[in-house]
């Protein structure tokens, strides 16, 4: 049985581009379905995770997938999940 | 190919037999026998309580039902099951497709079929010797088996 791979991952080998565009926070479950694996839809920022959880939060996975050019463009709300608490965001890292 | 589809429904239902000008949000006025407008009085349920056009299965809920309240922008429709918010619904959803391979989207299907339809559409410009060979072949079989009369899958 093959592990599930999001649609944009399959498109990389075909030289197709992928984007996630949403009027909701980009780390919400629906737009995140294009780039993230998560045990729960609520793990949007690293402070949403319980202690000892090694799996990256959804916002972190978005950055990873964009750096890997699997997601070429992401447009949406919820920037607090990518900002530190010092910048009025919700991240502790 | 362009596909327009949601990933879930909401637990919302629309009453039938609400006459003309029973807008949303509004109380559900019956159908006028003359076919013009609607009766002056809203329809009522078995408890003599006025109906609304829209009802939710679950979520937060209002019980007041005058037309003035029902047409207020902040009015919250009645819900059968009390919850602080309305979660997703489980009904079937619509899928609209246009362009190459859109003919494969029809009838009642499992949601994973959407991906299998998009698959041949995205390989349509590839030649068979490319790295997409295996997938393109599988895609061709998909289009053939779904539509035996379709004799020119451009992907191979």
Image (spheres, coloured by chain):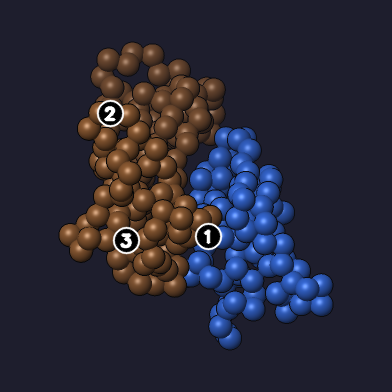
Left or right: where does residue A67 sit relative to residue B93?
A: right
- Observer-nearest residue: B141 or A33? A33
User: How far apart in space, not on screen, are marks 1 and 3 (Cα)?
Assistant: 19 Å
> Residue beneath label 3, please?
B57
Left or right: where does residue B17 sit relative to residue B138?
A: left
Q: What chain letter is assigned to the residue under label 2?
A: B
Q: Residues within 10 Å of mark 1 (few under 14, many from 20)?
A: few
> Residue beneath label 1, please?
B74
Please determine whether, in this image, residue B136 is positioned above or below residue B150.
below
Q: What chain letter is assigned to the residue under label 3?
A: B
Occupied quadrant, residue B17:
top left
Residue appearing at x 24%, y 54% in the figure? B44
How far from the left and from the top, in percent, is residue B26? 41, 49
Residue farthest left in this picture: B46
How far from the left and from the top, in percent, is residue B100? 46, 22
Residue appearing at x 47%, y 22% in the figure? B99
Left or right: where does residue A37 sit relative to residue B17?
A: right
Q: Are marks 1 and 3 on the same chain?
A: yes
Q: Are marks 2 and 3 on the same chain?
A: yes
How far from the left and from the top, in percent, is residue A22? 61, 49
Q: Earlier in the sequence, mark 1 or mark 2?
A: 2
- Observer-nearest residue: B136 or B59? B59
Number of numbered discs visible in the structure rendering: 3
Residue farthest bottom in this picture: A51
Closer to the observer: label 1 or label 3? 1
Examine the rendering and report whether any part of residue B70 can be seen: yes
Q: Earlier in the sequence, mark 1 or mark 3?
A: 3
Residue farthest front in this picture: B40
Among the chains pictured, the one given blue colouring is A
User: How far apart in space, not on screen, are marks 2 and 3 (Cα)?
Assistant: 31 Å
> Residue beneath label 2, please?
B35
Q: Name the secondary structure under disc 3.
A: strand
């Amino acid at each position: 049985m093959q592990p599930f791979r999001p649609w944009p991952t399959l498109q990389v080998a075909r030289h197709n581009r992928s984007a996630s565009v949403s009027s909701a926070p980009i780390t919400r479950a629906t737009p995140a379905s294009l780039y993230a694996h998560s045990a729960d839809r609520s793990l949007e920022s690293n402070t949403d995770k319980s202690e000892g959880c090694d799996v990256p939060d959804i916002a972190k996975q978005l950055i990873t997938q964009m750096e890997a050019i699997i997601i070429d463009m992401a447009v949406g709300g919820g920037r607090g999940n990518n900002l530190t608490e010092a910048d009025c965001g919700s991240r502790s890292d | 190919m362009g596909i327009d589809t949601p990933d879930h429904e909401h637990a919302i239902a629309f009453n039938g037999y609400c006459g003309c000008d029973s807008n949303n949000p509004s109380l559900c006025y019956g159908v006028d026998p003359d076919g013009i407008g609607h009766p002056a009085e809203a329809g009522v349920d078995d408890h003599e309580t006025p109906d609304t056009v829209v009802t939710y299965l679950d979520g937060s809920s209002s019980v007041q039902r005058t037309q003035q309240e029902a047409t207020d922008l902040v009015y919250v429709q009645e819900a059968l099951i009390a919850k602080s918010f309305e979660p997703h619904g489980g009904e079937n959803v619509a899928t609209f497709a246009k362009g190459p391979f859109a003919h494969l989207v029809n009838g009642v299907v499992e949601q994973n079929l959407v991906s299998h339809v998009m698959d041949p559409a995205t390989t349509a410009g590839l030649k068979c010797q490319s790295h997409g060979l295996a997938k393109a072949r599988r895609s061709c079989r998909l289009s053939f088996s779904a539509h035996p009369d379709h004799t020119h899958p451009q992907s191979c």
